[in-house]
Amino acid sequence: MIYFEKVSKVYDNSAALRDVTFKVAPGEFISIVGHSGAGKTTLIKMLIAEDKPTDGAVFFESLNVHTIPRGRLPQYRRKIGTVFQDFKLLSNKTAYENIAFAMEANGRSDEEIRENVPQALELVDLGDKMWNFPSELSGGEKQRVAIARAIVNQPDLIIADEPTGNLDPIATYEVVQILKKINDLGTTVIMTTHNKGVIDALGRRVLTMDGGRVVRDDMDGKYSL
């Protein structure tokens, strides 16, 4: 599904990525770990075509991501749902409206929105918070709304970039369980994290980065830094 082929990225004579090669199979759950500056964020930017490699190529379903014409990038990015550490919810919209807005931007009909938004909120166990504003939600609940927004258009891939970085242990556990549920339903998940407990509890594949390189690729889900 995803293939990084000898990808390097240099900024001002400093290498953020160095000869990175790995594959992600459809339906896989992979965690990417590494200290600050290891290259995790740059790697994600390559995948969503926010930046281009200095060398190498990134493929998504056999499509070279960085040969996509600018006008077709929105169509490509619809295949990917993204969850951020800081939620990025619209403060003046309810949970329902935040998710509906993502569907509207994707050209979905009013009927689809009325049907799919409640389903997405139920999937993240927030059916009873549909009309709450972000200020009325806990940090964990905000992140679950963000996950619902990411999945409502049924993407092939979810990228969760430090999704538990601002959460307490209980909320962290709930968010990780929801990501596992989404993965069990067939969606590929790529998560970046610093949280050793999350990695050890998941027991899924772990890619460890250091100095812009992939230094370990473990299938048994251990945090090795």
Image (tube, rainbow, N blue to C red):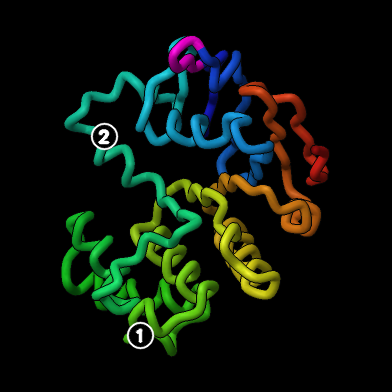
Q: Is residue 28 above or below residue 164?
A: above
Q: Is residue 12 magenta?
A: yes
- Please tell me which residue is depicted at 17% across the width and 31% down the height of the picture: 71
- Please tell me which residue is depicted at 37% across the width and 77% down the height of the picture: 134
- Front residue of 66/118: it is 66
Q: Secondary structure at mark 1?
A: loop
- Residue extent of the magenta highlight: 9-13
Magenta span: chief secondary structure: strand
| Residue type marked 1 | Asn
Q: Position of residue 96 (x, y in %)?
A: 31, 77
Q: Position of residue 93 (x, y in %)?
A: 26, 75
Q: Which residue is mark 1?
A: 132
- Distance between the alpha carbons at the discs numbered 1 and 2: 33 Å
Most distant residue in the bottom direction: 128
- Please tell me which residue is depicted at 79% across the width and 46% down the height of the picture: 221
Q: Position of residue 56 (x, y in %)?
A: 49, 12
Q: Position of residue 153 (x, y in %)?
A: 34, 58
Mark carried by residue 73: 2
119 to the left or right of 184 = left
Q: Is residue 55 magenta?
A: no
